[in-house]
Image: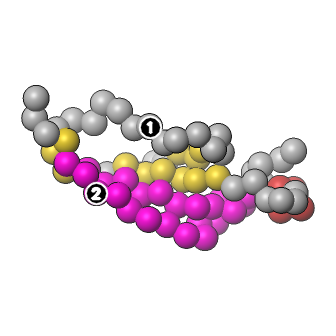
Amino acid sequence: MPVFGPGALDVSPRIGHIHVTVDDAPWRWADASGEPLIIQSLPPGSHKVLIQLADPTHRAIDQGVVELVIAEK
């Protein structure tokens, strides 16, 4: 079954995916696993994680931001 691209628009029920951007990086990754999102090895300090729910053509249809602080060891 296609998950990405125009062909995936015809899949029913639709299979969604998320886009994840950490700290306003110029890149992001897509995840369609349905598993919990695990981000590790962030340095101490404030961080922002943008999570976007995307359709099969990668158009964001909803989003949320998680802000967190990693303490010094």
Residue 56 visible to the viewer: yes
Q: Which residue is more in the foreground, 25 or 34?
A: 34
- Identify the residue shown where x is 44% and y is 65%: 64
**Majority secondary structure of magenta residues:** strand
Question: Where residue 9 sits: x, y (%)?
Answer: 83, 62
Question: Where residue 29 sits: x, y (%)?
Answer: 53, 45
| Amino acid type, residue under disc 1 in the picture | Ile
> Which residue, given by chain and number where applicable, does mark 1 sit on?
38
- Identify the residue shown where x is 69% and y is 55%: 16
Residue 37 drawn in magenta: no
Badge 1 density bin: few <14, some 14–19, many ≥20, Cα 10 Å: few
Q: Earlier in the sequence, mark 1 or mark 2?
A: 1
Q: Tell me: residue 38, above or below residue 55.
A: above
Residue 6 visible to the viewer: no
- Identify the residue shown where x is 87% and y is 57%: 11
> Which residue, given by chain and number where applicable, does mark 2 sit on?
67
Residue range highlighted in magenta: 47-69
Identify the image quadrant of residue 55: bottom right
| Amino acid type, residue under disc 2 in the picture | Glu
